Image (tube, rainbow, N blue to C red):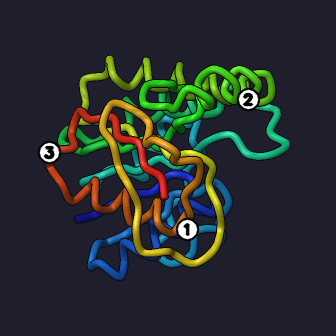
Amino acid sequence: MRIAVLGASGRTGREVVALGRTRGHEMIPVVRRPGSGGEGERIADGHDTVALRAALADVDVVVTTIGPVEGSVDPTVMHDSLVATLPALPAEARLLVVTASGPMIAGDDPLTRFVAKPILWRVFGDAWRDFLETEAVLTNADVDWTIARPPMLQDGPARGRYRARRDGNVRWGFAIRRADLAAALLDTIEDPTTVGATISFAS
């Protein structure tokens, strides 16, 4: 498959591009800054529909790993990027969007749901609202979408395993390495039954 990755210069995006190539996919890093995506990069700002339409013109799948980063002053970066991306998608392309399990409570243990999450909302509220608003837009869009919800992302080599759950958080799943999330995202792309699904992943 020809897979474009938005946010390919970020830590998660780079893992997806690298692993996808080892699986034989044609990976297309889509980045804002020339030289930041490596081999085969295409340049487009995530808020520029015209540039995105050109960058995504011939792809089969779009994976967006665009999201809030530490120190960001843009509380709607994910939502705004999705709004710009949707009209830029090729007619038959599939869209996989990475949000987060943080603001969701279905599947959580009682301690996480009633103690930890209310505290975390005070810290990550802006980012978590962005995730929720992004998912609301996506689930009402006329595209073949899938939502991936990881918990806290960690760097480091892949452990080679992950757990997944549809329509609910993974119980006691508080983190996942980016390299393992990359494997989960590619497995999701390669599974046609995940179209229209919301899937949480964790170690």
The residue located at (41%, 49%) in the rendering is 54
- Percent position of residue 192, x then y: 14, 49
- Residue beneath disc 1: 14
Looking at the picture, does residue 11 appear above or below residue 83? below
The residue located at (79%, 22%) in the rendering is 122
| Nearest to the observer: residue 142 or residue 198 | 198
Residue 160 shown left or right of residue 77 in the figure:
left
| Nearest to the observer: residue 83 or residue 178 | 178
- Percent position of residue 19, x then y: 41, 75
Q: Label 1: how many residues lie within 10 Å, few (<14), some (14-19) or many (20+)? A: many
Tell me where residue 126 sits by quadrant: top right
Q: Which mark is residue 193?
A: 3
- Percent position of residue 60, x then y: 24, 54
Amino acid type at circle 3 is Thr
- Upstream in the sequence, badge 1 or badge 2? 1
Amino acid type at circle 2 is Leu
The quarter of the rendered structure image containing the N terminus is bottom left
Tell me where residue 176 sits by quadrant: bottom right
Amino acid type at circle 1 is Arg
Residue 37 shown left or right of residue 144 in the figure:
right
Q: Secondary structure at mark 3?
A: helix
Residue extending furthest bottom? Answer: 22
Give how far apart the Cα atoms at labels 3 and 1 are.
Answer: 25 Å
Q: Which mark is residue 120?
A: 2
Label 1 with label 2: CB-CB less than 8 Å: no
Q: Secondary structure at mark 1?
A: helix
Give how far apart the Cα atoms at labels 2 and 3 are.
Answer: 33 Å
- Upstream in the sequence, badge 3 or badge 1? 1
Q: Label 3: how many residues lie within 10 Å, few (<14), some (14-19) or many (20+)? A: few
